[in-house]
Amino acid sequence: YILGLIEHRDEVLPLIDTGLKFGQSSITIHEQTCIVVINVFNKATNRTFHVAIVADLVTDVIEVDSAELQVIESDYKPGYVIGAAKHEESLVLMMNVNKVFSDTDVLMINNLVKEKAH
């Protein structure tokens, strides 16, 4: 699911295909495809690092107050979905990116970046 590495603000970041990461088909690159930089916490080093993800489309960036977050029963959601919130006329699923990437993923990504950046 790692497409390669990109440079962003003088930092080398792994580029993640979100389609492959979530067990779907690879993201098809088109005019509305976006790269989003996210923060991921590395428990092993107790530090945060950046990852670039490829998304089909980004329509908006919003802030959701935790009081607006509706819990989704665990039987109906993957472990990385925190809950849902209503934004305008849409239902937005919120996810914990720290649960999307396992400890093994984080170590592999860190090693790849170190290896390729030097």
Image: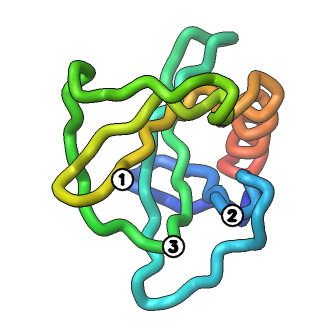
- Quick check: 66 above or below 85? above
Q: Nearer the viewer, residue 78 or 17?
A: 78
Q: Tell me the distance, in whole angstroms, between the alpha carbons under discs 3 and 2.
A: 9 Å
**Quick one: label 3, few (<14), some, or many (20+) residues within 10 Å?**
some
Q: Name the residue rendered at 45%, 35% in the picture.
A: 39
Q: Position of residue 85 (x, y in %)?
A: 31, 39
- Report which residue position mark 1 lands on: 9
Dot placed on the residue nearer the N-terminal end, 3 or 2: 2
| Lateral position of residue 113 relative to residue 13, left or right | right
Q: Secondary structure at mark 2?
A: helix
* Nearer to us: label 3 or label 1: 3
Q: Which mark is residue 101?
A: none
Q: Earlier in the sequence, mark 1 or mark 2?
A: 1
> Rounded to the nearest whole Å, what is the CA distance between mark 1 and mark 2?
25 Å
Residue at image mark 3: 56
Q: Which residue is mark 2?
A: 19
Which mark is in front, 1 or 2?
2
Q: Amino acid at mark 1?
A: Arg
Nearer to us in this view, 68 or 55: 68
- Element at badge 3? loop
Q: Which of 103/47 is in front?
A: 103
Q: Compute the Cα span from label 3 to label 1.
A: 23 Å
**Which residue in the rendered view is the most extreme toward the bottom?**
31
Name the residue type under label 3: Asp
Q: Is label 3 in contact with label 2 (beta carbons under 8 Å)? A: yes
Amino acid at the residue labelled 2: Gly
Element assignment for label 1: loop
Q: How busy is the neighbourhood of tag 2: few (under 14 within 10 Å), some, or many (20 plus)?
A: some
